[in-house]
Image: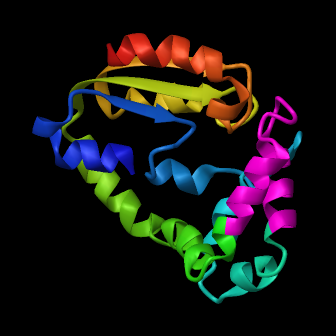
């Protein structure tokens, strides 16, 4: 989302930070759902189902869903603490929130077309691109090279939940970048 906004409003954005968020382009269709190390990014396809199955499977089980999903992508176990899990689950129980969380993924096909169009004119602003080595890792900085000319990339020793798993390292990179 942040790239799409920056690409559409280039004159009003000074810099961009992308953390563990791939750009939705043709590479989306190459994410494996199963890898030799275990599950890949199966969740993208599951979240895109528009027949209500994801909502029906999670409704009433939000705490179990969040705890399991966080654990799957968390390298620094316990960094996303039980209070955070409970808060995230409580938000999903609010009317419309669970469906909205999946609606984001259900727009990916159209988003890919728009992202590819914007790529024709790379961003001139500085971009900080961070991946977690236990999740998307180097793919985040590498992919951003296709979208911007001034990319600073980093891969942190954590999973997908960078801010919770590696807050000090994130601040060490983010504060100077935002300067």
Q: Is residue 179 above or below residue 96?
A: above
Q: Is residue 159 found inside the magenta-colored segment of the image? A: no
Q: Is residue 83 found inside the magenta-colored segment of the image? A: yes
Q: Please indicate whether residue 132 sits to the left or right of residue 86 in the image.
A: left
Residue sitting farthest toward the left: 11
Q: Is residue 44 above or below residue 138?
A: below
Q: Position of residue 61 (x, y in %)?
A: 84, 74
Q: Please indicate whether residue 130 sits to the left or right of residue 121 in the image.
A: right
The structure residue drawn at horizontal position 53% and vertical position 17%, both measured from the top left corner, is 171
In front here: 20 or 70?
A: 70
The structure residue drawn at horizontal position 72% and vertical position 29%, both measured from the top left corner, is 165
Q: Position of residue 129 (x, y in %)?
A: 47, 26
Residue 39 visible in image:
no
The structure residue drawn at horizontal position 53% and vertical position 32%, both measured from the top left corner, is 140
Q: Is residue 160 above or below residue 84?
A: above
Which quadrant: the C terminus? top left
In front here: 118 or 10?
A: 10
Extent of the magenta region = 63-90
Q: Is residue 7 above or below residue 98?
A: above
């Amino acid at each position: 989302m942040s790239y799409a906004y920056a690409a559409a409003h280039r004159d009003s954005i000074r810099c961009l930070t992308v953390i563990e968020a791939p750009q939705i382009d043709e590479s989306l269709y190459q994410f494996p759902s199963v890898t030799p190390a275990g599950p890949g990014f199966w969740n993208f396809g599951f979240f895109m189902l528009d027949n209500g199955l994801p909502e029906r499977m999670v409704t009433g089980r939000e705490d179990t869903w969040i705890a399991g999903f966080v654990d799957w992508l968390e390298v620094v176990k316990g960094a996303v603490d039980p209070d955070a899990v409970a808060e995230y689950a409580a938000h999903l129980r609010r009317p419309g929130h669970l469906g909205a969380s999946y609606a984001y993924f259900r727009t990916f096909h159209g988003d890919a077309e728009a992202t590819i169009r914007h790529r024709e004119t790379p961003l001139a602003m500085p971009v900080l691109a961070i991946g977690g080595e236990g999740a998307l890792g180097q793919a985040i900085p590498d992919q951003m090279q296709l979208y911007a000319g001034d990319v600073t990339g980093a891969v942190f020793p954590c999973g997908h939940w960078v801010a919770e798993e590696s807050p000090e390292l994130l601040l060490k990179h983010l504060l100077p970048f935002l300067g």
